[in-house]
Image (tube, rainbow, N blue to C red):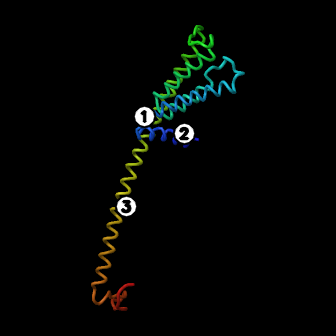
Amino acid sequence: MFNRTLSFVSRGMRTRARGFWAAPYVVAIFLILAATVLRLAFLQSLGTSVVFITFYPAVMLAALYGGLLPGMLAALLSVVAADYLWIEPAGSLFINRSQDWLAVAVFVSNCALMSWVAGKLRQSNSRVRQIQDSQRRELEEQVAERTALLHASEERLAAALQHRADGIRLVSESGRARREGALA
């Protein structure tokens, strides 16, 4: 589950890096529309008791995908959708009860905190990827350098064996020549 979340975060960062700066905002709008449709289609029995229940996950996903600003856009759109559809008087963008104002304030503050944490997670993930990329490049350079040294050493050994007229003489422990000839 955690790896999927990091994958989702990374996908959002790569999308921004490629120049699709609006993609996280489009994703935020889509997620809030999906949360609204879900609430309308499947959760009618809830009435106005838990107005923001389907919006919390949508805001979190928008923040994970795009960071603080897309998360806050999702929170704002959630408040507008909830106010228009479920907060009395329904069908208007007016809030007149103090408990509804409190619910909106709690929702927005929770969303701000979630979006901030998701933004920090994205920054940390970005730093980890930069460190990994740097270490990977460093290791690739070291491998290439050592491979080149190994090839040069092999070439020197082959040249030494090839240019040696009488081959290599092996000497036993007592100091006597055991056999003559090139190494295979």
Mark number for residue 21?
A: 1
The alpha-carbon separation of the residues under discs 3 and 2 comes to 33 Å
Residue furthest to the right: 45
Q: CA distance from mark 1 to mark 3?
A: 37 Å
**Residue visible at 36% across and 53% down in the picture:** 138
Q: What residue is drawn where x is 65% and y is 20%?
A: 50
The residue at which mark 3 appears reads as: 143
Q: Quadrant of the C terminus?
A: bottom left
Q: Amino acid at mark 1?
A: Trp
- Give coordinates of residue 1: x percent, y percent: 59, 41
Tell me the kind of residue under disc 2.
Thr
CB contact under 8 Å: marks 1 and 2:
no
111 relative to 11, above or below: above
Residues at discs 1 and 3 in contact (Cβ within 8 Å): no
Decide which of 125, 25 is in the foreground and name it: 25
Q: Residues within 10 Å of mark 1 (few under 14, many from 20)?
A: some
Q: As drawn, is 147 to the left or to the right of 78?
A: left
Q: Secondary structure at mark 3?
A: helix
Residue 168 position within the rendered picture, expressed as x and y whole percent measured from the top left: 32, 86
Residue for badge 2: 5
